[in-house]
Amino acid sequence: MPSTSILGAYYRGINNGVYGDDFPDVPPLKFNYTQASGLNASLRLPEVATEVTMLKHNETVELVFQGTNLVAGVDHPMHLHGHSFYVVGTGIGNYKRSIDSLNYNLVDPPHMQTIAVPQNGWTAIRFKADNPGKCMVHALSSRTTRKLGNGDGIYSKER
């Protein structure tokens, strides 16, 4: 764990290993997220790391949260600090962009601050990165977080 906060390190220009920038844009290990049988038990414990992704100010960002069946899978509340977001899609099973994104609600999507990702399902959100600074995306019942930054600010991801 870093000895100083990500935001403090960023503004003071003292990274020195506090954060990195190699958080993947896609899951590093793809598997059937809705079935836990036959999976390595190490997948049940999140990796402790601190990573950062910079976003352009006013960039439109889409995040898809995939519910899993690891650790007895349950609906998973997710929250994004510093922004409200639009829920453009949700479904059951493994998310497939080529199919599921065709059914997005882009006309009148719900405007939210917290969502519940369904057990063994997915939820897609979109937001505009117009609030400079560090904004954390996290599960309300987990240590797994993803922090994001835009413009002159920082968005980071802890995994």
Image: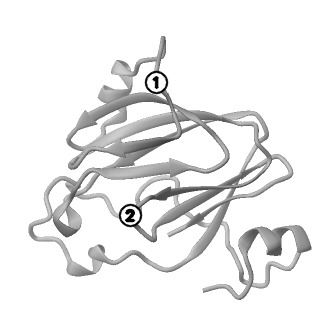
Quarter of the rendering containing residue 31 = bottom left
How packed is label 2: few (under 14 Cα within 10 Å), some, or many (20 or more)? few
Residue 14 spot, x, y in % from top left? 86, 79
Element under disc 1? loop
Quick one: label 2 or label 1, which is nearer the N terminus?
1
Tell me the amino acid under the disc marked 2. Answer: Ser
Tell me, for residue 110, which label it has, or none: 1
Judge from the rendering whether residue 87 lies leftward or rightward of residue 11; answer left or right: left
Determine which residue is flagged by label 2: 141
Element under disc 2? loop
Quarter of the rendering containing residue 97 = top left
Residue drawn at point x = 41 percent, y = 42 percent: 115
Residue drawn at point x = 33 percent, y = 49 percent: 66
Judge from the rendering whether residue 149 lies leftward or rightward of residue 127; answer left or right: right
Which residue is nearer to you in this view: 17 or 142? 142
Residue drawn at point x = 73 percent, y = 76 percent: 5
- Hey, which residue is sitting farthest left in the picture? 37
Tell me the amino acid under the disc marked 1. Answer: Pro
Tell me, for residue 118, which label it has, or none: none
- Hey, which residue is sitting farthest right in the picture? 12
